[in-house]
Image: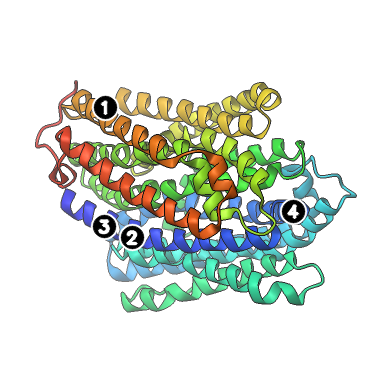
Amino acid sequence: MSKQLAKSTSVVAGMTMISRIFGFTRDMVTAQFFGAGVAFDAFSIAFKIPNFMRRLFAEGSFSQAFVPVLANYQKNQSEAAIKSFLGAMMGTLGVVLLVVTVLGIVLAPWLVRVFAPGFATTGARYDLAVIMLRITFPYLMLISLAAFSGAILNTYSRFWVAAFTPVFLNICMIGATIWLAPQFHVPIIALAISVSIGGIVQLLFQFPFLKKINLLPCPRVDFKDPGVRNVLKLMVPALFGVSVSQINLLLDTLFASFLIVGSVSWLYYSDRLMEFPLGVFGVAISTVILPHLSRHHASNAARDFSLTLDWALRCILLLGFPATVGLIVISGPLLSTLFQHGKFDGHAVVMAQKSLRMFALGIVPFMVIKILAAGFYAKQNMRTPVMIGVIAMLANMLFNLALIWPLAHAGIALATSLAAFVNMGFLYYFLRQKHIYLPQAGWAYFSFRLVIANSILAVWLWLASGDLQWWLASQWWERLGHLTFLLLSAGIIYLAGLWIVGVRPRDLFMMQSEVVVE
């Protein structure tokens, strides 16, 4: 079983890596053309609001509610019943999304006021944000239907399709920035248009693969369908529980809107780098284990359920800790190499570095949250994550209020990371209390070995990266060459460190036969 999990995770991580590389290319291009000023601050809000709702509804509450129900249908129902359920689900979801999209377009001025109250209602940032939000809001409906299609493919182990799909959004945004933007009187508008175009392409791309497995839905609206009602019942409370991290990031934007111009952009670019390991590894592993956990729950296989969680947590820590070390130690070189072009200058690099280091502290808890939350959602227990999510959100607000004045935008990033620790701690506590997760033996020794290997990595990166001023003053090709050396050498050093302390590749491909509480 663990070999299958590792193989599927590798596929998803590989496709997601390709998507993230295109995403970084997109960010490099937009940074060069638009910098970190009024226009990009406005676009960040116009893109973040539907993107936030997408993560909240589509990849958040809907996917976590839909996949366990579909997995149960897959195990216990006929193919005809599955197709009927999928048709009803797609039609019903489509109607709900259409209504939400229309409301979003109509209420765009008020949404911008809510999510970016620091934007003056008569200023250029506000006006641009309203215009672009009306253009980008249909993306919510399109990408949510794409996420629905991807959830079907994931449940049937076609993981690579959904993981690769975001590449098309990045391609559309890159193309719009380079070729379409110069045709507009306000160039940033082209970037907003490309978001909705990207949503259409992502949805259509998945249809042939659904048809290949004979599961392309024929939409029909049916709120009374038992499967649809079950999904909707599970989905409502999951809105907070699964998407607290997204709510916290949106709160960051709200607080940042009161700070100096550029703060929203600095948080955006540092968040993009933080999202790279989170998306490649955290999302990949949680995406793969949710259908497996759901099937274990449907089969009453409590032992296999716990073993799957344990395996996922060990993988997350093996990958999450070096990501944290890397983003903290070489945050400046990364930002300088990727984004210091055109209008994104050295000052923007220094400011974004401050928030990136604070965000990096939350990488491991953010990853662990995705795994632990999946343990509840696979059992269709939405109440517990909701309760924990509310606590974490309140904690984030308090941390923001305490840290924003002494640390400005970096305090906002630190508040998000601290709230993630709160969320992770409570999820772990209740999983243990309810005996859903029983850790295998050897965690103390495993953790000690990780600390040693990552300490070696940190020392190497600190010595090899040099002074930030060199990066800010160098040519882009010099920065790229040095960063490539740093990343390649870091991978070798970390793997060597793991080997020295006794961690072997087989550790990722086997689960112990007994579950033991330490």
Marks 4 and 3: which is nearer the front?
A: 4
The reply to whether dot 2 and dot 3 touch (C-beta < 8 Å) is no
Secondary structure under badge 4?
helix
Q: Earlier in the sequence, mark 4 or mark 2?
A: 2
The one of 385 and 75 positioned closer to us in this rendering: 385
In the image: residue 19, left or right of residue 429: right
Numbered badge on residue 435 = 1
User: Mark 2 belongs to which amino acid?
Assistant: Gly
Look at the numbered discs 3 and 1 and tell me whether their residues touch, using CB distance below 8 Å: no
The amino acid pointed to by label 1 is His
Residue 471: x %, y % from top left: 54, 47
Tell me what residue is drawn at x 50 percent, y 48 percent: 334
Q: Nearer the viewer, residue 396 or 210?
A: 396
For label 3, the residue is 8
Disc 4 target residue: 42
Q: Residues within 10 Å of mark 4 (few under 14, many from 20)?
A: many
Residue 107 can be seen, yes or no: no
370 to 88, vertically: above or below: above
The quadrant in which residue 30 appears is bottom right
The disc, 4 or 3, on the residue closer to the chain's N-terminal end is 3
Residue 170, image x, y percentages: 54, 66
C-alpha distance separating marks 4 and 3: 38 Å
Q: Nearer the viewer, mark 3 or mark 1?
A: 3
Residue located beneath label 2 in the image: 14
Between discs 3 and 1, the one toward the N terminus: 3
Residues 210 and 365: in front is: 365
Specify the amino acid type for callout 3.
Ser
Question: What's the CA distance linking mark 4 and mark 2?
Answer: 32 Å
Tell me how far mark 3 sits from mark 1, CA to CA.
Answer: 27 Å
